[in-house]
Image (cartoon, rainbow, N blue to C red):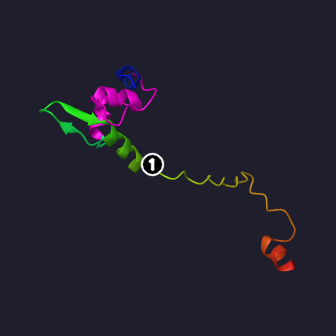
Amino acid sequence: MSREAAVAGTLPPDADAILTAAEVAAWLKITPRQVQRVGIPCVRLGLRTPRYLGRDVLAWLETQRRAPLPPRRRRQSRDPLGTPPAEGPSLADVGAMG
């Protein structure tokens, strides 16, 4: 894959790619500062020269994956007038009938 594709954020880079924070940020659609803050493993080539290996970024992404949350149950709306519930058997009564 070309370096331009990694920077454009369209495809993940090769596992052997060495990326700057700006390139990782473009790929993940976050800011370079966030790349440094979220804890993606890097190789420090100097005091201000972190470089990110494509395989390390991919491995870090896998550790961040979470199972989808179950759908939220909707709360029953409260009646602003305070009218009593409808007459009839309750759910407990219906279960005992069957």
Q: Quadrant of the C terminus?
A: bottom right
Whether residue 31 is visible to the viewer of this picture, yes or no, is no
Task: Locate the N terminus and report the quarter of the image it occupies.
Answer: top left
Question: Which stretch appears magenta?
Answer: 8-37
Q: Is residue 83 visible?
A: yes
Q: Quadrant of residue 50?
A: top left
Q: Which is more toward the observer, 31 or 22?
A: 22
* In the image, residue 35 above or below residue 23: below
Residue 88, given in percent of the width and then of the height, sits at: 87, 68
In the displayed structure, 10 sits above or below 96; it is: above
What residue is drawn where x is 39% and y is 50%?
63
15 drawn magenta: yes
| Magenta-span inclusion, residue 1 | no
- As drawn, is 34 to the left or to the right of 77? left
Left or right of 90 in this view: 3: left
In the rendered view, tell whether residue 78 sits above or below residue 51.
below
Q: Quadrant of residue 82?
A: bottom right
Seen as rendered, the residue at the extreme bottom is 96
Residue 54 image position (x, y, % from top left): 33, 36
Tell me how many marks there are: 1
Residue flagged by tag 1: what amino acid is it? Arg
| Side of 58 where 39 appears, left or right | left
Task: Identify the residue at horizontal 35%, vertical 37% (top origin).
Answer: 15
